Amino acid sequence: MKIFYFLFFFLISSTSFAHECILKGTSAKEITIYNSCKADLRLNPKRIDNSNSNDLNKSLFKVKIQKLKDENKKLKNQLLDLKLRLNSIMISINSYINN
């Protein structure tokens, strides 16, 4: 059972260390580090940067926000309709009271 927990932790933690390769300089050492990083990403497809998932999350949030805005408009219209109906009922009640 301990092995299962260790493997689970290892698999979860390995995906959280994903990074992107950034060339930090023009020296031979920096270029070598950059190239090895790129090669590592090609050989290990699980270690990709999160930009695609971030773009997907942003798109999903935009869709969710639009749905919530639409629902908000619908609820505001329902509330306005309810106010108009209550106002109509109050007018009818007042007309009965005054007669």
Image: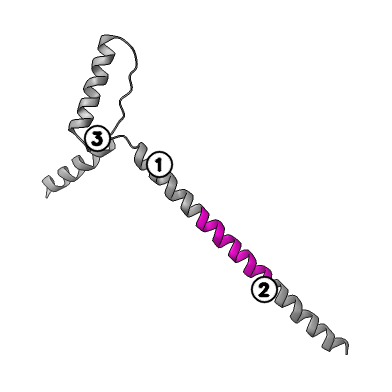
Say above or below: 87 vs 39.
below
Q: Quadrant of residue 91?
A: bottom right
Q: Which residues are magenta?
A: 66-81
**Residue type beneath disc 3:** Arg
Q: Label 3: which residue? A: 47
Tag of residue 84: none
Tag of residue 82: 2
Q: Please rate how many residues cluster around mark 3, counting C-alpha atoms within 10 Å: few if below 14, some from 14 to 19, many from 20.
A: some
Question: Residue 58: image x %, image y %?
Answer: 44, 44
Say above or below: 2 vs 93.
above
Of the two numbered discs 2 and 1 on the same chain, state the one appearing first in sequence.
1
Q: Is residue 99 left or right of residue 13?
A: right
**Residue type beneath disc 1:** Asp
Q: How far apart are the alpha carbons under marks 3 and 1?
A: 17 Å
Of the two numbered discs 3 and 1 on the same chain, state the one appearing first in sequence.
3
Q: Report the mark closest to the observer, 2 or 1.
A: 1
Q: Is residue 39 left or right of residue 83?
A: left
Q: How far apart are the alpha carbons under marks 2 and 3?
A: 55 Å
**Residue 67 lies in the magenta-colored region:** yes
Q: How far apart are the alpha carbons under marks 2 and 1?
A: 40 Å
Q: Is residue 4 left or right of residue 83?
A: left
Residue at 36%, 36% (x, y): give it. Answer: 51
Question: Residue 95: image x %, image y %?
Answer: 84, 85
Residue at 79%, 84% (x, y): give it. Answer: 92
Of the two numbered discs 2 and 3 on the same chain, state the one appearing first in sequence.
3
**Magenta part, dominant SS:** helix
**Residue type beneath disc 2:** Leu
Asked whether disc 2 touches disc 3, contact meaning CB atoms under 8 Å apart, the reply is: no
Question: Residue 99: image x %, image y %?
Answer: 88, 90
Q: Label 1: which residue? A: 55
Residue at 21%, 31% (x, y): give it. Answer: 42
**Residue 77 lies in the magenta-colored region:** yes
